[in-house]
Amino acid sequence: MAAVTSQPRYGAGYPPSEFQTGVLDCCDDCGTCCCGLLCFPCLCCNVARDMDECCLFGPSMAMRSLYRARYNIKGSLCNDWLCTTFCMVCATCQLKRDIDKRKEQGIF
């Protein structure tokens, strides 16, 4: 029996990358931005549903961190905390835009 010497990385199948849009790039997808501004709980539930998670965790730092780990997106827990604390709507819109772009590319 071989000893396990390292844990597998969650996003190991993906090369290191960045979010495909910035936190403040609302004009890249006005529909998502409007949804975030007019019905934020709906947007949160859409993000959570896309990620097969509980609707209550859609706008959270944990969801953003999980997504970054899953797709090997560069960043830090500190940055996730700052984005979700001070710009929760923008951070959630960014996450939804990235999910949609990855779906279009066939890598979600």
Image (cartoon, rainbow, N blue to C red):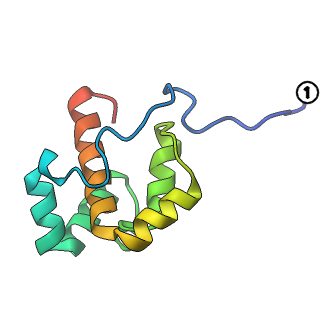
Residue 38 found in image quarter: bottom left
Query: Is 23 left or right of 70, judged from the image as shown?
Result: left
Say what amino acid the circle numbered 1 marks. Met
Horizontal relation, residue 58 to residue 37: left or right:
right
Expressed as whole percent of the image width and height from the top left, the position of residue 94 reads 29, 52
Answer yes or no: is residue 102 visible: yes
Q: Can you say whether 26 is above or below 10 in the image?
A: below
Residue at mark 1: 1
Q: Is residue 24 above or below residue 107?
A: below
Above or below, 76 relative to 60: above
Q: Say which quadrant the C terminus sits in.
A: top left
Residue 36, x across and y down, in percent: 18, 66
Residue 62 shows up from this direction = no
| Point 31% across, 47% down: residue | 22
Q: At 49% from the left edge and 27% from the top edge, which residue is drawn?
A: 14
Q: Quadrant of the N terminus?
A: top right
The answer to whether residue 75 is left or right of residue 31 is right
Q: Quadrant of residue 20?
A: top left
Q: Residue 76: image x %, image y %?
A: 57, 51
Tell me what residue is drawn at x 25 percent, y 58 percent. Answer: 93
The residue sitting at 57% across, 57% down in the picture is 77
Q: Label 1 crowding class (10 Å Cα cut-off): few <14, some 14-19, many 20+? A: few
Q: Nearer the viewer, residue 82 or 12?
A: 82
Q: Quadrant of residue 21?
A: top left
Q: What element does badge 1 sit on?
A: loop
Residue nearest the observer in this picture, 24 or 102: 24
Rendered location of residue 68, percent (x, y)? 48, 46
